[in-house]
Image: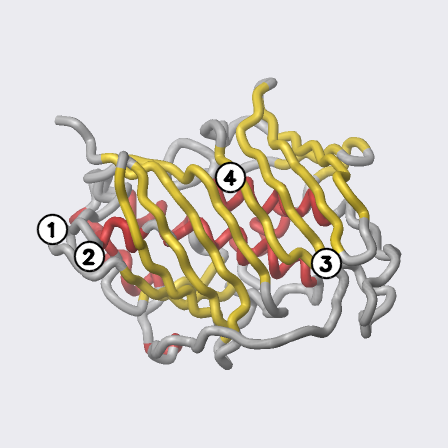
Amino acid sequence: MSAALDSLLDLLDLERIERDIFRGTSRSAVVPRVFGGQVAAQALVAAGRTVPPDLPQALGSARAGETPSAHSLHAYFLRAGDPGAPIVYTVDRIRDGKSFTTRRVVAVQHGQPIFHLSASFQTYEEGLEHQADMPPSPDPETLPTAAEMLPRYAHLFADPGMADRLGEARAAVDLRYVDEPPFGTVGEAREPRSQVWFRTNGKLADDPLLHVCMATYVSDMTLLDSVLLAHGRGGWAVGDVVGASLDHAMWFHRPFRADEWLLYDQESPSASGGRGLGQARIYTADGRLAITVIQEGVVRVPRG
């Protein structure tokens, strides 16, 4: 396991200070605020740790005794997080049902809520099956790593140290772009679609909640790239747009491992009113649709 991944796992291992109250810390991000994926992942950890493993099983369940698994989350980013201060997560146990368990989490800093999440967990059951086909994509092993790719674009970044900071911020994850990232084709409008492959830089424990939380963490890294591509914008690293995540939703369809290759297929159907929408599907390497993601964010062109 890489040192960066070990550090991220420590970040997700929240301190329990009361039955339903947890405390987490932050680490430096590319921008001077807490990375949204970190807050979302920590909030999901807090929610998951309050789900009892011995709930009554759903009708038709074939795996009695298993802890319910996360199947969806819906979140709002309310205020920028302060990376220098702890974050307190309070969990409301909304419902413990036979099939579904619901939790609400509020993240608080300096006496104010900065993030709100609702998450639902489901006991395993069998049912109807179908999925959208996985789109074509090259073998991730043939694509350049971040360490190989980022130095090629360092001259485009507004800050000379941005390439190093981007590399450090993503060091826990092996994330590989299929095509040029937005900052690689500044000024060239492209189809609002992008693909990245990702996996953690090391093996993870066999805890389904951990893999879901890790995918949640990564999901906030590149989803709005397709918005930028449609307008030839390079993004926050280049400095030709400013913005932040507004809301985020995920549905976890099938089991997966975040330490094995996952294809993040992303597109943007709309941008207007200073906001951009990204939607995506995440597939396992063998073609199973694991996750659907939708996010809206502020995407503004700086005023001269």
| Dot placed on the residue nearer the N-terminal end, 4 or 3 | 4
Disc 3 crowd rating (10 Å Cα; few below 14, some 14-19, many 20+) is: some
Q: For marks 4 and 2, give the CA distance.
A: 27 Å
Going by the numbered disc 3, the residue's amino acid type is Gln
Q: Secondary structure at mark 1?
A: loop
Which residue is disc 1 drawn over? Answer: 187
Q: Residue furthest top?
A: 111
The crowd level at tag 2 (other Cα within 10 Å; few <14, some 14-19, many 20+) is some
Can residue 69 be seen in this snapshot? yes
In this rendering, the label closer to the viewer, 2 or 1: 1
Which label number is shown at residue 184? 2
Q: Nearer the viewer, residue 202 or 116?
A: 116
Residue drawn at x 41%, y 40% as measured from the top left: 245
Q: Quadrant of the N terminus?
A: bottom right
Mark 4 in CB contact with mark 3 (< 8 angstroms): no
Please name the amino acid that badge 2 sits on.
Gly
Q: CA distance from mark 2 to mark 1?
A: 9 Å
Q: Nearer the viewer, residue 162 or 190?
A: 190
Residue 179 appears at what percent x and percent y?
Answer: 26, 67
Q: Amino acid at mark 4?
A: Arg
Closer to the N terminus: mark 2 or mark 3? 3
Q: Which mark is residue 122?
A: 3
Q: Residues within 10 Å of mark 4 (few under 14, many from 20)?
A: some
290 sits to left or right of 140? right
